[in-house]
Image: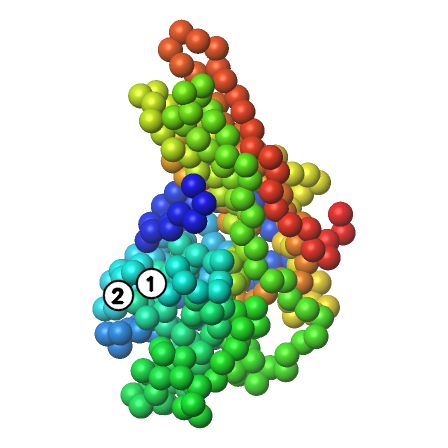
Amino acid sequence: MKKLIYGGLFLATVGIGLISCKKESLPISEINKSEISSDGKLLIFNSVESFERAVDEQNVESRENLLSKISSQNYKNYFSVDHPELKNGESSQEMDDFFGQLLNEDGAIQIGSHIFKIDLGTDKVFVIKSENKESAYDDLINGNTNNKNVAVYSVDQEVLYLVNGETEEKCGGIGGFDNYSNVVNLDDAGNIKFDSNCRLFRAGVYFRVTGRVEYTQAYSGQVKIALEIQGPQAWMRRRPCGSGTITTHHSGERVSGYFYRYLFEAYSKSRNLNGIYMFVRARAEITPPGQPTVIKYTNWTGRNVNSPY
């Protein structure tokens, strides 16, 4: 089940857990329509601040409102075409199911005065100023740095801030990871398999931590599935260095009900992390007609980097 592409839908996402030290931000519903537009090819956020508000951790309703607004814009998103470069590239990343809806079919987005091309095949971010859109867009998409207007960065860097004059900090950011558990058979016939996943997606201008569980269903009944977070709690500290901005989520069970996939969003921002502790596992149960309930678990999977635990 590894490497499944999560398509354009975001409706299976559940609410975010408890968050501490979270800065105030406008709900998506209060973002002025003029802050998000399209030129027929690119989705355009008119400022860094409007992009920050859009990608900051949101509840399900706010995120769906954002995607509804975006769907009315005249552009094709990343998932509208195949991207064969991912199959032959150096990166192990898949495109994030939320962020990919903000990128156009070329993997590009305009934020304020810059246009960013996210190349997951090489883990690079190419950038031009929006004033050079007409003359340098093709070179941007092709990663042609022979064009002096095309700059290049890593997906691990906080590119959105570097291009706007912020000095790169040396405290270190966390590299991406995509850790999968073992695959477990829920039924004796091996028709229903499930696993769990803990992922840090990074794209230079966007970083997201999720826990996921998915399973295959070949049974006429229903399977109840949940994602569990290992104690003492999920913990992550975002950059900039020394900011002390900590996000936490209580350990325990996030019950999904009856879905084929389940996603728990633990972190979503335009800044990378320099500390994380998050481990997840899947819990699945099935009650065949006239038989006892069967409950099984995957192993724990996740990452501990510069955390206090």
Q: Quadrant of residue 107?
A: bottom left
Dot placed on the residue nearer the N-terminal end, 1 or 2 = 2
> Residue at point 33% right, 26% down?
218
Mark 2, secondary structure of its residue: loop
Furthest toward the front, the residue is 88
Q: Is residue 59 positioned above or below 146 on the image?
A: above
Seen from this angle, which residue lies furthest bottom? 148
For residue 191, what is the image quadrant? top left
The residue beneath circle 1 is 83
Residue 280 percent coordinates (x, y): 59, 40
**Residue that lies at the very extreme toward the top in this rendered image:** 290
Q: Position of residue 26 (x, y in %)?
A: 47, 63
Residue 76, numbered label: 2
Query: Are the residues flagged by discs 1 and 2 in contact, CB closer than 8 Å?
Result: no
Q: Amino acid at mark 1?
A: His
Where does the image place residue 249, in percent across and percent down from the top left? 61, 45
Q: Residue at x 34, y 87 (%)?
A: 136
Q: Residue at x 48, y 73 (%)?
A: 124
- Mark 2 Cα within 10 Å, few/some/many (few <14, many 20+)? some
Report how many numbered discs are placed on residues in the image.
Answer: 2
Classify 220 as above or below 250. above
Picture quadrant where residue 27 is located: bottom left
Q: Is residue 100 above or below residue 48?
A: above
Q: What separation in Å lies between label 1 and label 2 (alpha carbons)?
A: 14 Å
**Secondary structure category for the residue under label 1:** loop
- Which of these two is toward me, 31 or 177? 177
Which corner quadrant holds the N terminus? Answer: top left
Question: Is residue 264 among the parts visible in the rendering?
Answer: yes
